[in-house]
Image (spheres, rainbow, N blue to C red):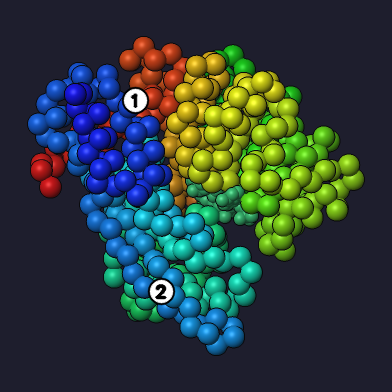
């Protein structure tokens, strides 16, 4: 049996209750066949076994008291997946679906994504099954403080640097940082990224993942003689990534006609009014349904176990909500409705069958670990500014972000071409990232 199949088979036995993790591993390893054939020595080094095993998994109890005075208990996680090229780095997710499988898949993806940025950061992920929806500000603060009461001993600006993800934005990072500072009695600004501008945050971090996605899309389209100008776009989600993807897409002259949240989607044939979305989501923390009450002609469709946003006709789809939002059935609908380009803003939004279908049909697919790397890249720029005790302007950070995304696309394209994979940038991203991480691991010996 081929080395790769062996490794996947063993992992399936060992981690059979971790479907998301297995999915992420399979997608990466299956695209490394040609690389592994070229390097038979990898098998003796057990490189694939090592790269798929987290260096450390920490789970912990998070007890806190709600506004009614009742004691609540959640589970906290930090998966420090691979530190070969720098301090562990990756976001924290607060969502009821969080479990070890999801943490491991996100940590695994993060290792490769961080390598693609070209910056010295290892991969990690963390979070909790805490549900921030409907919680008061005081409850969020007490939860974050309790979470940090344990996490602090595992992180540090040269050790592991968490950031935001689903359910963790500027407010949560603020409470987490405050508690860390109090426990440590030191101002170690570089221990968390996504901080507020008043206390060590970076300009353009908020916009970075969404803008970065569009910089990558611009490059990918340019390489295939297309532009964003005049294209119709669907964007799932209406959180941090979705909102700033929409903003940049509109600046590039595209027409975004639909956005969504976990309850449903809105369609606005005139093009989404992003100020209304920002008011509902960033200010009021409300539901997207509200958009249809405020904007004439907009239509709201409730989710019915599926994602109605993918039934809408468009040229480009940008899944920016969560994992596995596009399955094979939805991929077929998208293609039959004329979608020619997919850009993954969320992590692993497309399942393996859907990815294969898109590639088979010649659809251009910008893979998450490359296309959404702008967030973590800008987090690393935040760390640099913290170390230098300097702040760059919005334009300076945005320019560096653009250069990083342009370079990431160039590397994905180069790796795909090197192995005669045409426009399969999914494999290109995996190969380019693996090349860097594997070399660093080999150089550092068997650890
Ligand atoms: P937010 O919490 O800001 O927004 C998430 C959005 O997705 C919300 O609109 C949310 O709807 C929707 N959503 C979440 N879970 C589900 C679900 N199970 N089904 C349907 N909709 C859902 O998160 P981000 O924008 O930060 O993250 C979105 C994606 O991008 C994630 O996959 C994340 O890992 C990835 N990402 C984020 C980065 C960042 O810098 N923030 C960097 C790189 C990747 P609702 O409000 O109803 O829950």
Question: Where's residue 103, x and y in %?
Answer: 39, 53
Image check: 341 left or right of 421? right
- Above or below 135: residue 364: above
Residue 184, located in which quarter of the rendered image? bottom left
Question: Where's residue 268, x and y in %?
Answer: 81, 39
Find out whether the residues at labels 2 and 1 contact each other: C-beta distance under 8 Å: no
- Above or below 186: residue 130: above
- Above or below 324: residue 382: below
Question: Which residue: 44% across, 47% down?
Answer: 376
Asked whether 186 or 171 is in front, the reply is 171
Question: How far apart are the alpha carbons under marks 2 and 1?
Answer: 39 Å
Mark closest to the chain's N terminus, 2 or 1: 1
Q: Secondary structure at mark 2?
A: strand
Residue 208 showing in the rendered view? no
Q: Which residue is denoted by mark 1 in the rendering? A: 31
Question: Which residue: 69% across, 38% down?
Answer: 309
Asked whether 353 or 382 is in front, the reply is 353
Image check: 252 left or right of 341? right
Image check: 64 left or right of 29? right
Q: Which residue is denoted by mark 2 in the rendering? A: 62
Question: Where's residue 338, x and y in %?
Answer: 68, 20
Look at the numbered disc 1 and say if its residue's Cβ is closer than 8 Å to ligand 1: no
């Amino acid at each position: 049996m081929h080395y790769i199949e062996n490794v996947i088979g063993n992992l399936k036995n060992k981690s059979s209750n971790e479907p998301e993790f297995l999915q992420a591993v399979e997608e990466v390893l299956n695209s490394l066949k040609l690389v592994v054939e070229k390097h038979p020595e990898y098998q003796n080094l057990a490189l694939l076994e090592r790269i798929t095993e987290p260096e450390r998994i920490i789970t912990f109890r998070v007890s806190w008291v709600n506004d009614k005075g009742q004691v609540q208990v959640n589970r906290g996680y930090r998966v420090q997946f691979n530190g070969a090229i720098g301090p562990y780095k990756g976001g924290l997710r607060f969502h009821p679906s969080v479990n070890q499988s999801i943490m491991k898949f996100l940590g695994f993806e993060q290792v490769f994504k961080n390598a693609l940025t070209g910056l010295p950061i290892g991969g990690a992920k963390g979070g909790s099954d805490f549900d921030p929806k409907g919680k008061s500000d005081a409850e969020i603060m007490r939860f974050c403080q309790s979470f940090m009461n344990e996490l602090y001993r595992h992180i540090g600006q040269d050790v592991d640097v968490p950031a935001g993800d689903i359910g963790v934005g500027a407010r949560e990072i603020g409470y987490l940082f405050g508690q860390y500072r109090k426990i440590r009695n030191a101002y170690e600004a570089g221990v968390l990224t996504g901080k507020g501008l008043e206390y060590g945050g970076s300009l353009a971090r908020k916009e970075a993942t969404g803008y970065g996605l569009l910089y990558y899309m611009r490059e990918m389209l340019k390489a295939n003689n297309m532009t964003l100008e005049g294209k119709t776009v669907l964007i799932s989600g209406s959180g941090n990534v979705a909102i700033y993807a929409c903003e940049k897409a509109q600046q590039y002259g595209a027409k975004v006609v639909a956005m969504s949240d976990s309850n449903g989607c809105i369609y606005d044939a005139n093009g989404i009014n992003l100020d209304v979305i920002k008011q509902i989501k960033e200010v009021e923390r409300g539901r997207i349904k509200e958009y249809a009450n405020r904007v004439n002609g907009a239509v709201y469709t409730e989710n019915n176990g599926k994602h109605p946003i993918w039934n809408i006709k468009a040229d480009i789809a940008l899944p920016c909500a969560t994992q596995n939002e596009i399955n094979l059935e939805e991929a077929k609908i998208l293609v039959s409705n004329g979608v020619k380009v997919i850009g993954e803003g969320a992590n692993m939004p497309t399942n393996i069958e859907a990815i294969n279908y898109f590639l088979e049909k010649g659809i251009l697919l910008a893979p998450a670990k490359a296309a959404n790397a702008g967030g973590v890249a800008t987090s690393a720029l935040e760390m640099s500014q913290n170390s230098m005790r300097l702040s760059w302007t919005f334009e300076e950070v945005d320019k560096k972000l653009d250069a990083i995304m342009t370079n990431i696309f160039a590397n994905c394209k180069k790796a795909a071409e090197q192995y005669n994979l045409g426009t399969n940038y999914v494999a290109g991203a995996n190969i380019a990232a693996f090349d860097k991480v594997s070399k660093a691991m080999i150089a550092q010996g068997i650890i």
